[in-house]
Amino acid sequence: MKKIKIIGGGLAGCEAALQLAENGWKVKLFEMRPAVQTEAHQSGNLAELVCSNSLKSKLQTTASGLLKEELKFLGCKLLPIAEKCSVPAGNALAIDREKFAQKVTKICQSHPNIEVIREEISKLDDELTIVATGPLTSAKLTHELIQIIGNKHLYFFDAIAPIVATDSLDFSKIYRKTRYDKGDADYLNCPFSEEEYYDFVDALNSAEKHTAKEFETHFFADIKFQFYANCTPIEELARRGKDTLRFGVMRPVGLEDPKTDKRPFAVIQLRTEKNDKTSHNLVGCQTMLKYGEQKRILRKIPGLENAEFLRFGSIHRNTYLNGPQILNENLSLKNKPNIFIAGQLAGVEGYVESIFGGLLISKIIIENFQKLPQTTIAGQLWRHLVTAQKNFQPMNANFGLLPPLAERERDKKIKKQKYAIRAIKDLTEM
């Protein structure tokens, strides 16, 4: 029986483990938690989602939705589990993160071909290995990777949104609605007047914020706070301009208040964490504010005046490698080709993209998989990781990755539909 070591029990590692195990491989899946915790995880479960509980849109006419369809076609293992753990979120696939992580953990631990080992790995030997340690790769393993690849290690910082108890919210101010009434009204909306909004922005700008932890500033001597665009802290957005938030994450368009039939000046949305709707996360409100400041400032949000915080937002290091410089086409290290890099560590960004990373590596190892159509999101993400570029940055699913259609289409909705039809057709004919 063929054997393989997988380091990291996140989404990429678990997807790869299940794929390989189902194809007769004997898998040793190493996860350092709970013995060695990260600065962001809450449990020792495998496949724990950290930043959000949303896997983004299910619609095939969105890039994230199309990627999901592509992964289902390729036989993805984790997406069906996620769907069984879904919570109401309109056209998005949001999940009960605890239920999902518990289910994935149980499936992996009970699989006859998977041995889950709770141990931190600090050295990479000559065994066939997948490194899928993600954005919170430990200091010891990061040091080991640097020794192998040289000084081509990149990083940025990521932030987590707070979670509040639903029964602590004031529903005389909050209303339930999905933007433009598309799909079920699964989001809670907190409407701001002009005065409330600018008071909120001023409070964000004057608040005390966390700095890099001592370990991180020591480990990365030249550290600077660099944020991935989709996870920029709310206070950083406020600093960029007083109206930045209301034209971005607090955009009120399509969210008219049914109590007044008028559009608020700004809106913060809340998305449920569980099917029982006992907790909600603040959409787009990732933050690095100190905990006391979070409680004070976020209670300025209409309807959250007496909010009970089940989890405060936080900041953590997010590590990834400069793939085009150090990876072969098959995502193995040029300096150590028995080592494969999967998921966010390789330079994809997002939950579904991370699942894809594990699926892709397993296909490469099992089937000597060599290509995916250029017309697919999956294929273009793969190319992004290994194609030379001036300033390599993590990439998530987006239609900008795809080559143009044979015939120009001006209607954006129809254009996206054609992208999706073409992608699935080319996958089928692959």
Image: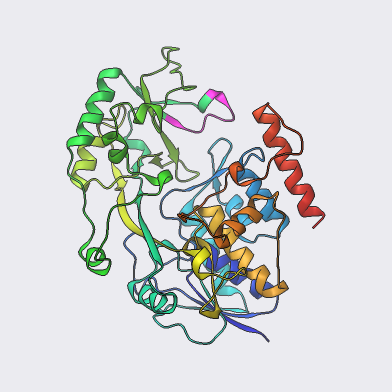
Residue 115 image point, x, y percent: 54, 80
- Is residue 191 shown above or below 103? above
Query: What is the quadrant of residue 164 in the picture?
Result: top left
The residue positioned 67% from the left and 68% from the top of the image is 363
Query: What is the quadrant of residue 381 in the picture?
Result: bottom right
Please indicate, yes or no, whether residue 295 appears anywhere in the rendered image: yes
- From the viewer's perspective, tell me whether residue 143 is left or right of residue 300: right
User: Is 94 a magenta residue?
Assistant: no
- Is residue 154 shown above or below 6? above
The residue positioned 66% from the left and 30% from the top of the image is 413
Please indicate, yes or no, whether residue 41 appears anywhere in the rendered image: no
Q: How is the image coloured?
A: rainbow
- From the viewer's perspective, tell me whether residue 345 is left or right of residue 311: right
Residue 82 image point, x, y percent: 58, 53
Residue extent of the magenta highlight: 180-188
Of the 4 image quadrants, the one containing the C terminus is: bottom right
Residue 217 image point, x, y percent: 23, 63
* Dominant secondary structure (helix, strand or loop) of the stretch shown in magenta: loop
- Is residue 200 shown above or below 46? above
Residue that lies at the very extreme toward the right in this rendered image: 429
